[in-house]
Amino acid sequence: MIDLISFQTKIMNEVARHNAFAEDDPALAIACVLLIAIAVLLFSGNVEGAGNDFSCFWGAGTMAVDGHAAAAYDWDQLHKQLVLRMPAINQLRYPYDQFPLPFFYPPVFFLVLAPFALLPFPIAFLAWSGAKLSCWLLVIYAIRPRPSALLLALATPPVFYDMFHGQSALLASALLGAILLTLDKRPFLSGILIALLIFKPQFGVLIPFVLIATGRWNVIITAALTILALVLLTGVSFGWDTFKAFGEGATTVSARLQAGGGVAWFNLSSVYGLLRVAGLGYGLAWSLHMAIASAVLVWVVLIWRRNVSFALQAASLLAATPLMSPYFLIYDLPMLAMALVFLMKADLDQGSLVGNRRAIRIGLGVIVVLGYAFPFVLVPVGPFMCATVIAIIWVKCRQPDLRPDPAYG
């Protein structure tokens, strides 16, 4: 009799796990809808300045299409081109040293920007925004095809910061999520996606360590060959001098960043930025940043070496990535929302969905509060967001009912 009751209970639990209504969190969904509505009202009320960061992408792309890709890394030349091409209102909207931002992306990014450069700026900005948001939502849906997951992915402040400024973090985060989704079942595709992520290399810092630690050599070889092909295609299409110009431009930006003249420290939502805001000098702040990054790297590798849920492994990589590089800004953190979506999937895999909803709500709450507090407190909030998600993962990894699940297809 006891065995029969136990069996019936097990069957009911399995049914509940695969029930669409049981998997969703109504309270979370309602909160996300309200957050999205508030964010739309806030950002739509200040349309002036929208797309400022995309202007440097569009300007660099137009210079590349005209055969002057290397010149796009010269800030003065990029500014002059945009003054000629942009409407008069955009010339007056920003001070000279803010319009546009300097362009220092790897030259392979020209392959992405060139098609948008063929369009007028307003249309290009809308097309860019629609394309990257669509990629982001498709990957979120692939991780967990539930309304609450999509709403959570849209409700976090970094998503709105990225959309407003016209940045590239949503596209990079979507690529990173797609890499994780295809890592086991489609390793060839995963390797190609890793190569595409080279346009924003700080997002992929942890990937080589994870691939080596888990022996995914086929993915490594595919990524290396694809990167070589992209470099060759870029050199043939836009000139080999673009690589030299990129090296010089990246060195200049790095020097300005270290000296504190390139960006205010509070804008760097990284451990390094937080330490500089706290008053530490370059040497000590850099050393402590590297020490923390190394410790987090070891933690991620250990998680990937453990026999735990793949969703937890994916979330750990996403939550730790912003702690690796000093150059992460507030709009670079949509990947933390993706980490929470993976954690929602981990709840389902572990059969403890209801009991862990509170952790997801806490994670979302911290990201939302810190994200919208950032413009007022002017303190790097990224490390605190990452620490919250990492703490949730840490607790989940210590739960006794953990069991591994296959990577997604």
Image (tube, rainbow, N blue to C red):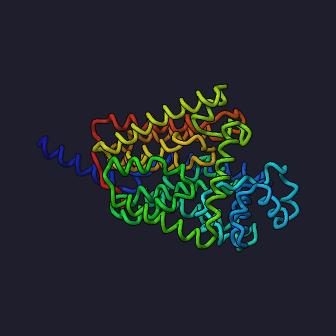
Residue drawn at the location 60% of the way across and 58% of the way down:
106
Instruction: Give the tally of numbered discs.
Output: 0
Q: Left or right? Give the position of 137 relative to 406.
A: right
Quadrant location of residue 60?
bottom right
Decide if residue 226 is on the left or right side of residue 281: left
- The quarter holding residue 257 reads top right
Residue 204 visible in this rendered orientation of the protein: yes
Q: Nearer the viewer, residue 131 or 168?
A: 168
Residue at x 68% of width, y 57% of height: 166
In percent of width and height, residue 91 lies at 86, 58
- Residue at 23% across, 47% down: 10
Q: Is residue 249 depicted above or below 61 in this figure?
A: above
Q: Is residue 283 left or right of residue 291?
A: right
Residue at figure coordinates x 53%, y 65% from the top left: 231
Foreground pick, 13 / 394? 394
> The N terminus is located in which quarter?
top left
Q: Position of residue 340 (x, y in %)?
A: 47, 46
For residue 406, side relative to residue 145 (left or right): left
* Whether residue 29 is visible: no
51 up-or-down from 32: above or below: below
User: In the picture, residue 84 is in which quadrant?
Assistant: bottom right
Please tell me whether residue 72 is drawn above or below residue 303 in the rendered image.
below
Q: Residue 362 placed where, x, y %?
A: 50, 37
Q: Nearer the viewer, residue 407 or 200?
A: 200
